[in-house]
Amino acid sequence: MFAAEIFMHRFLLYSPVRTLNPEEADWFYTPVYTTCDLTPNGLPLPFKSPRMMRSAIQLIASNWPYWNRSEGADHFFVVPHDFGACFHYQEEKAIERGILPLLQRATLVQTFGQRNHVCLKEGSIIIPPYAPPQKMQAHLIPPDTPRSIFVYFRGLFYDVGNDPEGGYYARGARASVWENFKDNPLFDISTEHPITYYEDMQRAVFCLCPLGWAPWSPRLVEGVIFGCIPVIIADDIVLPFADAIPWEEIGVFVAEKDVPKLDTILTSIPPDVILRKQRLLANPSMKQAMLFPQPAQPGDAFHQILNGLARKLPHPRNAYLKRGEKILNWTAGPVGDLKPW
Amino acid sequence: MKLSALQPIRRANSFRSPSSAPLDGGAAPSDGPLFRSPTAIFWLLLHAICCLVSLALGFRFSRLLFLLLFSPSSSPSPPSPPVLLLHRRPDLPLSPHPPTPFATPNATGSRVVVGRHGILVRPWPHPNPTEVMRAQRILDCVQREQRLQYGVKNPRPLLVVTPTYPRTFQALHLTGLLHSLQLIPYPLTWLVVDAAGVGAASNETAALLARSRVPVLHIRFSGRMPLRWSDRHRTEARMRLQALRVIKERRLEGVVVFADDSNVHSMELFDEIQKVKWMGAVSVGIVAHSGNPGMVAPQQLSKEEEENSPVPVQGPACNSSGQLAGWHTFNSLPYVNKSATFIGDGAMVLPQKLEWAGFVLNSKLLWEEEEGKPDWVRNLDEVGVNGEEIESPLDLLKDASFVEPLGNCGKKVLLWWLRVEARYDSKFPAGWVIDPPLEIIVPAKRTPWPHAPPELPSGKVATSQDPLEKRSSKTGRSSRSRRSSRNKRKREPQIDTHI
């Protein structure tokens, strides 16, 4: 899910848009693998990510003049973690921390997008979470296999480890889906991990993409690739590449408070609307825009990110600071973050 | 020290009673030290009690209390005083009191509230039948569109040939086949060849077929179904040939499928056979029914040798370039001593080497004087005359190498062959309806039929009324009912205890 930061780095290493001459560069990229700090279990640990990022910025600020001349306004960073540059997976903590102060002028390329949220800066580029393209290609089934599942979902409803009573995880939306529809024959939902997950998605008409701890989910990408209409249950979410992909026309948006009426909502969509959505989803360029293939292909997610960056050019005049002017506060933020990594 | 001790308590204070929080928060510092200790001790005690209760219950009951008291899901705008207090102090991770939901600090009209939400469950969380029907209609629409886009373009009609005869399990098998055929999305004609004699028996098949929603051609066959399995296979072959003759005479167009009434067909079979040009072969899984529990039960299919594969499969075999190289047939040698000889004797029924069900033909192969008809097929009029035995459709051809292997070159098993029959002398109510209902039903403590298998009428192929009469005279005990129905317990029987 977070592998986008690695693949973006690799893509830019050999890409024709890369220049080795900093004077002619429009954008500066610093690869920082903040999610590669893993727990003993192998899960990513965001606690030290701010320190990592800070140390990286200190490094580039002290060795090259380009950071200081704009205080990061022409730099961009890839932060595909749960709440982007707030560097925490719990929403309350992430909101408290806010975006790392050093990054307040830089452009952030992140998966997290929610309107009116601290962790979404204006001008950020929202990207889809990484989903492995080869693995998905390997599980394709013939397109004439009839779609016989009405609604499909596999995943957690209650996060028993972190929120055993429910109500926090997914703002209660996933738990609500389970409680309302576990007996419903139209809803094929469970917490199992089937081997035929991708094949089952291709046999379903609707795929639920409810929020988890963060509003975004790799199910969105999987739904688009496999032609399953995504049912997005996340209030105020900002979807990736919203200017290139017409999400309103290919997906169904359900407010979290309407989850108990989900079956009514989905069954009352007229069939011709559903067929139209499926036709739009079958468009290969849309599927390509969601993927991070290696090596890069035309029209893929890397291309869309570069498009997003290109749209922000030329940099505004206040990007470049006058001599001696300083905006960033290098000592802002919790004391623990100031320790060098 | 006192201040730091009071800090958590003041916070606890504010969490517990939000309406009085500012007062307390404001009032506490102004109190004298004497006043502080009883309140401090009180809150400490309360804190301790809450912890103990939570320990006992196993969950944080205060969260439940809070949920019930404040139901945050219905009030997106929480009371403001705790918001302000929470802002100023960082959250203690060990606090037993839940933080109230608070809006994001720079909320400019955001509807999203962080924190605990209620789980919304509607009062009747069960499916609504109208909605289920609507969903089925949507699925139907989607599948029709899929078929239009990716399925077979210009599908050809199907001609399904089924030999049948009236017997105990005919209703079971024929209804099953009927329902399978009703699901097929292509136009089809069902040719049912019926080996019933004259009399009441000949109308049973007709009664079953009357319920069909697919067009049926009921062809009466002028023979009787013999009792031995070997003879039955031959008679069935003759019945199928008669159906083929009908197709030839009427110049019916389509793909001919041999669907026996007791076989199990997958829907993919009917999609696959649309690809046939002249004659095709599919793989048939053989479910050799066994009445003996000592036999190994068939498991998942595999296409290895007979010894390794628990389920034998008959069908085409291909070489590496995908062309027909030979045939996988059924090896009946291991089962020869245990196989069934006559219908309904409870032993395993073995198929022929190559069953008719595994072959499909283009009906134009049967027409006479058809242009483009390949020359490797025999004229149908010459087949089967002068006592020639037709074992499989390959006998209709002069050269069997032109058969097209279907179903991914025979790797996909698209239908299952099995024969399940009741004893030929078993009685059953006509049309499986008991009318008028029985007055007295006696539970039989032992079977009215002796365990010895019924004697075969020697030399005679027909089995008509004589065995029936013989049986009914022996079953005197339960002869009060017109038909023996020892399994029917629909109504409360008057139990005859002196059995």
Image (tube, rainbow, N blue to C red):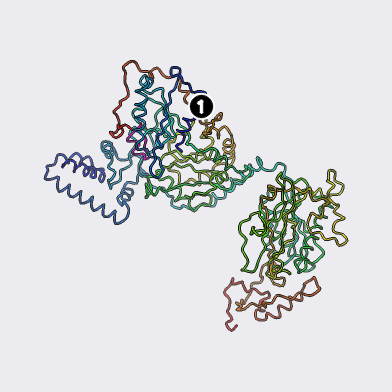
Residue at image position (51%, 26%) is A15
Apparent side of residue B5 relative to residue A20 in the rendered image (left or right): left
- Can see residue B291? yes
The residues colored magenta run A87-99
Residue beneath disc 1: A14
Q: Chain of mark 1?
A: A
Residue that sits furthest to the bottom in the current view:
B498
Residue sitting nearer the eye, B378 or A19: A19
- For badge 1, the amino acid type reads Tyr
Considering only vertical position in the picture, is A7 above or below B66? above
**Residue A278 found in image quarter:** top right
A76 inside magenta stretch: no
Residue sitting nearer the eye, B162 or A256: B162
Apparent side of residue A322 relative to residue A176 in the rendered image (left or right): left
Residue at image position (77%, 65%) is B232
**Residue B81 found in image quarter:** top left
Q: Picture coordinates of residue B97 (x, y %)?
A: 28, 47
- Can see residue A187? no
